[in-house]
Image (cartoon, helix red, strand yellow):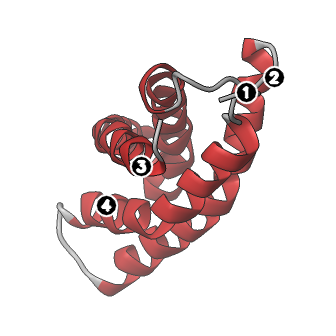
Amino acid sequence: MKAGREFLLFALAGVIGFGVDVGVLYLAAPLLGWYAARVLSFLAAATATWALNRRYAFGARHSGASLAREYLGYLLTMLGGAVVNYGVYVLVLHTFSGVWVPALGVALGSCAGLALNFLGARQLIFKSRRGH
């Protein structure tokens, strides 16, 4: 599968992951606060995008690892983008005010980490099958 198609499917999974991220964030924030809830929402979104990317964006590839090892590798690989994502999220929370600000922070943070996460997933987790 071509990188452009993989990227579009990766981005689409990211849009779905964004919905999971924001949903979990707003549900968990009353109990955990906006910062700790963001960690939980990231994990939920990363889990959703791993499953979607595994099936669709990188369905023609395989990691060669067990599901558990692939999942943990995916989470670790996404940490680079997560650091950028969380930094943008915190910056947005400190810059703006309003009920919509956490969702904006998630959206801008997700966009900031998108390319780094795609390259990590494509090159480190979902490697090309040999002979393809």
Q: Earlier in the sequence, mark 1 or mark 3?
A: 3
Query: Mark 2 sits on what residue?
Result: 69
Mark 4 or 3 closer to N-term? 3
Residue found at x 56% / y 47% = 39
Look at the picture and state if 63 lies above or below 93.
above
Residue 5 position in % (x across, y down): 37, 43
Foreground mark, 1 or 3, reads 1
Q: Where is residue 64 in the image (x, y as percent from the top left)?
A: 80, 20
Q: What amino acid is found at the position of numbered circle 3 in the picture?
A: Phe
Residue type indicated by callout 1: Gly
Of badges 1 and 4, nearer the viewer stands 1
Labels 2 and 3 touching (C-beta < 8 A)? no
The disc, 2 or 3, on the residue closer to the chain's N-terminal end is 3
Q: Which of 104 and 12 is in front in this view?
A: 12
Identify the secondary structure beneath mark 2.
helix
Q: Residues under labels 1 and 3: Cα distance? A: 21 Å
In whole angstroms, how far apart are the C-alphas of marks 1 and 2? 24 Å
Q: Which of marks 1 and 4 is nearer the N terminus?
A: 4
